[in-house]
Image (cartoon, coloured by chain):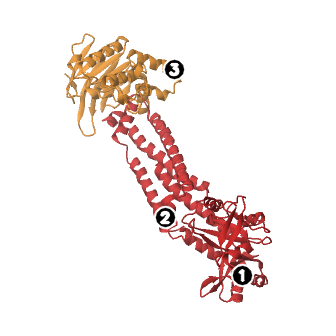
Chain colours: A red, B orange
Amino acid sequence: MTLLVALVATTLFIADSMKAEYKQDIQTAPDIVVSAQKALRYKTIDETQAARFLEIDGVSNAIPRVWGEYYFAKGNVRFKIVGLDEFENSTNSTLNRLRDRLSYDTNMMLLSPKVKAILNKNYYKDYFNFILQDGTLLRVNISQKSIAIPSIRDEYLIVMPKELARKIFAYADNEATDIAVSVKNSEEIAFSARKIAALLGNAKISIKDDLIVEYEQMYNYRSGFFLTIFIITFFTFFVIIYDRLSGLNSEQKREIGILKAIGWRVEDVLKTKLYEGLIISLFSYSLGIILAMVYTFIFNGGILKNIFLSSSRLLEHVPLQFHLDYATLALLFLISVPLYICATIIPSWIAATVDADEVMR
Amino acid sequence: MIELKNVVKKYANGVVAIEDLSLKLNRGELIVLKGVSGSGKSTILSLIAGLSKPSSGDIVVDDKHISKLPDHFAAAFRRDNIGFIFQKYNLISSLSVAENILLPLYPLNLPKEELEPRLQEVLNSLSIEDKRDRKVKDLSGGEQQRVAIARASINNPNIILADEPTANLDEKLSLAFIKMLEGLKASNRTVVVATHDPLFFDLESVDRVIEIRDGKVV
């Protein structure tokens, strides 16, 4: 029972953790993201376009964003670099907090704990030399402040002033990766997106709804894998319960016969079986939940997470954030403890109501 | 006094185990029910203990009509009046000696202060005090038999029923067991032993040997 509770709990915890992460990402995502394209490939966008978007009725903000990835060969890892401007507000409050902690008049960057550890391991404690596209080096100082990452996808995050990020990506002064647009009325997001598309022609316009679809595909929420594991686990659980309900083994029957022969009443037997079932099921439930928590949040979901993320391109190695849904715990409790107690009590009751003499024979 | 009046016991499969049996057993007697396997000795003990009900007839123990007691009261009757010693000891192997002995008293929810002296008394009387915390599965046959006797006497019953108690014991241990039964008889308990062990038949302490054959007194 412990293993089954652990298995079901692990699948639910992983799903819950991803769902929480997904909700958080959706909440902090911009209403519209505008990227430029050439031959259906992403390219940089002219940041002066942001001013044109602001002229559209309903658009409340348009921020050119500079971000991208930098490959660090020694660590065989890709850092995510986000450039921030001192006077720009992001839709992501964590990024806004990081923006306020940046120093804009020095060559300085903030590192996620993981990036800091990787650079430390490679002897970059106070600064790091980025290799620019022309082969020269750009020395950037490392801030010793620790930072919280905005999302599980930002494990390898580096935050720096926009100008520095532009140098690393070899962007021109007016170039940005994309433009994040905020719309006052959420009902008008699609309408504003169409207006932006009309202004830019071949731009790629992503709205929050697109993001939701992308995430659903990425997390594989309703995937067959999840349902298969869930159904198999439940089926196994009910087979065990059914097996218990279908009768006690001869040793258990003999024990009940002995107890009746030495003067125990049916209710005495049932009371003992109730306590026994309660202790075993509560212990198994608690142990199963603890095992699931350890497996999910300390061992990061192991094989089960990979099954969930079978089609994910981004999340294969990201840690699962601790998130506990009390409704999930209650559901697990209801499908395990009362069922197990019933499965203990009912066959015992059947055995206890038969003549002790017959039970022992 | 135990009285069986025209008792018939017929099982669901049609087998007649006891056929029109009448018996009177007096208080303080040591009675041996003698007979081959399947003669109905164990069924008589089971009926006296209220473990099963007769198909017809009546069983009266100390003015109580055992055969008519509902299951709930029959259990209470056993708890208060009967000590049962089984052929295969019927101890619960996962429990310790002390736990097995105290089993009949658990439903009474007696305080530990009351249980402990009673437990100590039976452990001492049967010389198994050093085994109290051992699991019964780790004991020898003779020791298990003592635990079974201790369990049968912990509730201080008037009647001790023993079903083939020496079937799994060698002669030395059987004689030791008989001594213990004599001790129980000496304390004015009625002891009924169902056996085909010849050791019991010529004992001075045995008041009567009743032969049972095909469910009848011969």
- Where residue A102 sits, quadrant-wise, is bottom right
Which circle marks residue A307 in the picture?
2
**Percent x, y of residue A242:** 41, 51
Disc 3 vs disc 2: which is toward the camera?
Answer: 2
Q: Which residue is mark 1?
A: A172
Disc 3 vs disc 1: which is toward the camera?
Answer: 1
Residue A354 lies left or right of residue A224; in this view the side is left
CA gap between label 3 and label 2 equals 60 Å
Using the image, determine if residue A288 lies above or below residue B18.
below
Count neighbours of disc 2 (C-alpha within 10 A) and say few if under 14, some if 14 to 19, many if 20 or more.
some
In the rendered structure, the residue with mark 3 lies on which chain? B
Q: Which residue is mark 3?
A: B114
Q: Are marks 3 and 2 on the same chain?
A: no
Using the image, determine if residue A27 lies above or below residue B181.
below
Quadrant holding the C terminus of chain B? top left
Quadrant holding the N terminus of chain B? top left
Q: Nearer the viewer, residue B52 or A316?
A: A316
Q: Nearer the viewer, residue A283 or A80?
A: A80
Judged from the image, the secondary structure of the residue bearing numbered disc 1 is loop
